[in-house]
Amino acid sequence: MLQFTFMIKKYIFVSGLFILSLVVLTSCETDFDTIAGYKDITVVYGMLDQKDSVIYLKINKAFLGEGNSLIYAQEADSSNYPNQLDVKIEEWNSGQLVRTFDFDTTMIYEKEPGTFYYPEQVIYKSKPFNYYKIVYSFNIFGDTLSFEKFWLNDESTYRLFVTNPLSGNQVTAETGMVHDFDITRPGLNQFIKFTNSPDAQTEFRWDKAENGGKYEIKIVFNYAELNINNQQDTIRKQIVIASGTSYPKPSDYEMYFYLKDQEFFNICLDRIPLSNGAESDIKERYSGTVEIYVAVANETFTLYLQVYEPSTSIVQEKPQFTNIENGTGIFASRYNKVKSKRIHTETVTELRNLGLKFVY
């Protein structure tokens, strides 16, 4: 009993010293700011695609202040520079300056709601420039089917310069381009023929692009509907049949994607019929094209996407990745390729047999 009483008194004495120490430390505490002095940090987001006739860049300043940063983000003055920046991109090929792209500010008015201010936002837009080349497509008879304009040269390197004329601060970045490639399957003049069989599958293939990193493929089915209440016009619609992502191995020279044919019919049955009895108003449907979209991110953009993709572990902290010198953000390239193919008549027959009112 005496030992227990002694332990209690000892505990009270030690606790009292601890509380007294807190009081002394608190009374001697010196106030300090948690916000450092202002530093001009430029944030750049830019993506080049040789098929784009206009280049857009998002250029802002980093901000920090006392209080809730989410509230600051809703104010345009927090992230916008008060003055216009000097922005240009130089095209270099074989060590020679080929041309210079100048930029001016413009306003977009349809920014979706989010963390930052909306719906208006200031961005930098390239001034008009000439296209680099025209590529024509021919059929087996030598007739011209279509043509595409390429506005940038995929053999060139592009260097970005952003200068603040008030502070003299300059940020730079450099990127190569994803080279053009071919979607090889389905091949020339081939229809796409989906067969409603559990063993059937359709193969899609494309060449591996030089400087390509991440590949995303999307298969889209286009069709049109004629309503019995308005037979003067058809309504065009589309559904995504499949999508996928792949990363090539160094030894790969071709990429591929397989789609089970029954998936095509299952998705059509799930998404095409109109609900709430409105299906009875459809007189007939017309099959259109199947479009194969392949989007490629260059190696720099691929690394950026991998660093900032959602974490699947309990560790949520992300390392910072940027290729902007004296700033932060990303300046890289991507390339979008599309190929359209008609649906085979036997596939249209299968759709009609499923009750989807398709005609030839």
Image (tube, helix red, strand yellow):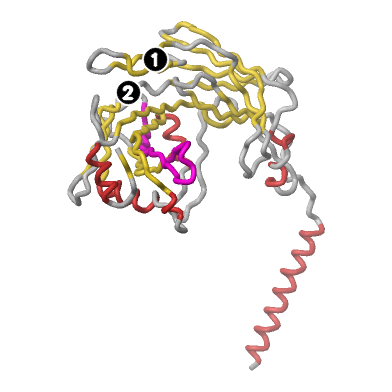
**In the picture shown, does residue 343 fall above or below 173?**
below
Query: What's the amino acid at mark 2?
Result: Phe
Q: Which residue lies at the image location 48% right of the left edge and 7% below the top edge?
A: 98
Q: Residue 191 appears at what percent x and percent y?
A: 25, 32
Q: Are marks 1 and 2 in contact (CB under 8 Å)?
A: no
The picture places residue 266, in percent across and down from the top left corner, at: 31, 52
**Quarter placement of the N terminus:** bottom right
Which quadrant of the view contains residue 127?
Answer: top right
Question: Over which residues does the magenta segment extend?
Answer: 212-237
Residue, disc 2: 181
Q: Position of residue 353 (x, y in %)?
A: 26, 50
Where is mark 1, residue-wise? Answer: 155
Q: Is residue 328 visible?
A: yes
Judge whether 156 appears above or below 283 on screen.
Answer: above
Considering the numbered disc 1 on the image, is that residue within a helix, a strand or a loop?
loop
Could you tell me which residue is drawn at 48 percent across and 23 percent down?
48
Query: In the current view of this chain or complex, which residue is farthest to the left?
Result: 199
Q: What's the amino acid at mark 1?
A: Glu
